[in-house]
Image (cartoon, rainbow, N blue to C red):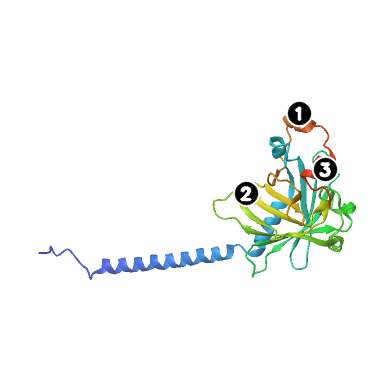
Amino acid sequence: MGSGEDNPGGTSGGVGGIVRGAVLKALVVFGGVLLIRRLRRSTTRWDHARAVADALSGEKFSREQARKDPGNYFNLRILTCPATEMVDGSGVLYFEQAFWRAPEKPFRQRFYMVKPCPKEMKCDVELSSYAIRDVEEYKNFCDRPKDQRPQPEEVIADIAEHLTTIQLSRCERGKRCLYEGSTPPGGFPNSWSGAAYCTSDLSIHKNGEIHIWDKGFDDDGNQVWGTKAGPYEFKPAPKSNYDDMFSPLNFSAPLSLEKIENSYAIDDQ
């Protein structure tokens, strides 16, 4: 009962098949290009190490935390910058920590070495801290012109004993952080202020802030230095404004050494 208008074997069907085939081939080629680009852009182990080094660098303060909870936290300033690079590609950062009112007098100075975790380990980045042979030579390293700093070969020669290593991994989806990690179980030997060992926890956040929780424990597992309320939260240096000049935090009474020692380690660990 057909009208005779259908033409399944006619010219229009052949043209449609050719067009569909061409479209299919184009989609396959386009998909292949996208896949290659995605593979080329995939994050490498060294990309993670560089991302951590970049996140740690710069000037950061615990100002907000000290304002909200002055009984447990001080307004501290940390400053970190690249110092050199090792032969294997590991980045070496200089780190110093001071009270905000005396940035020229850091009470803690370190070298950080940043590199990918070994492939057999379940982490992305290793962040190791090292003592400095002559800390006086490195005071305010990041604030100085490059020609007035110890040069790369001097930095490598001045890397002293290993202190701690934190194993960082990418944060799970949905968390505020980018990377987080801690020292291995048992921490690392430490003899400051009656401690037998120390531990460190670190998290790096998307907004540029980093959370650091360093603690020292005696042989019985009692905490003998470091904050007990939680990690220090360091945020990127805010732009100065008129209100900050008259903040009550900036006119607080001098801190006693005893109070400082109980809250935070101010000597080499």
Q: Quadrant of the C terminus?
A: bottom right
Q: Position of residue 74 (x, y in %)?
A: 76, 40
The CA span between labels 1 and 3 is: 19 Å
The dot on residue 246 is 1
Is residue 228 among the parts visible in the rendering?
yes
Taking the view exactly as shown, the residue that stands out farthest to the front is 220
Pointer 1 with pointer 2, Cβ within 8 A: no
Q: Secondary structure at mark 3?
A: loop
Is 199 on the left or on the right of 159, as rendered? Answer: left
List the residue tagged with mark 3.
Answer: 103
**If you read the primary sequence from the N terminus, does the residue marked by circle 1 or circle 2 appear first?**
2
List the residue tagged with mark 2.
Answer: 206
Depth check: give the residue in front, 212 or 269.
269
Rendering quarter of residue 164: bottom right
Depth check: give the residue in front, 137 or 44.
137
The CA span between labels 1 and 2 is: 30 Å
Q: Tag 2: Cα neighbours inside 10 Å, few (<14), some, or many (≥20)?
A: few
Is 13 on the left or on the right of 132, as rendered? Answer: left
| Residue type of the residue flagged with mark 1 | Phe
Q: Position of residue 235 (x, y in %)?
A: 69, 44
**If you read the primary sequence from the N terminus, does the residue marked by circle 1 or circle 3 appear first?**
3
**If you read the primary sequence from the N terminus, does the residue marked by circle 3 or circle 2 appear first?**
3
Depth check: give the residue in front, 195 or 269.
195
The dot on residue 163 is none
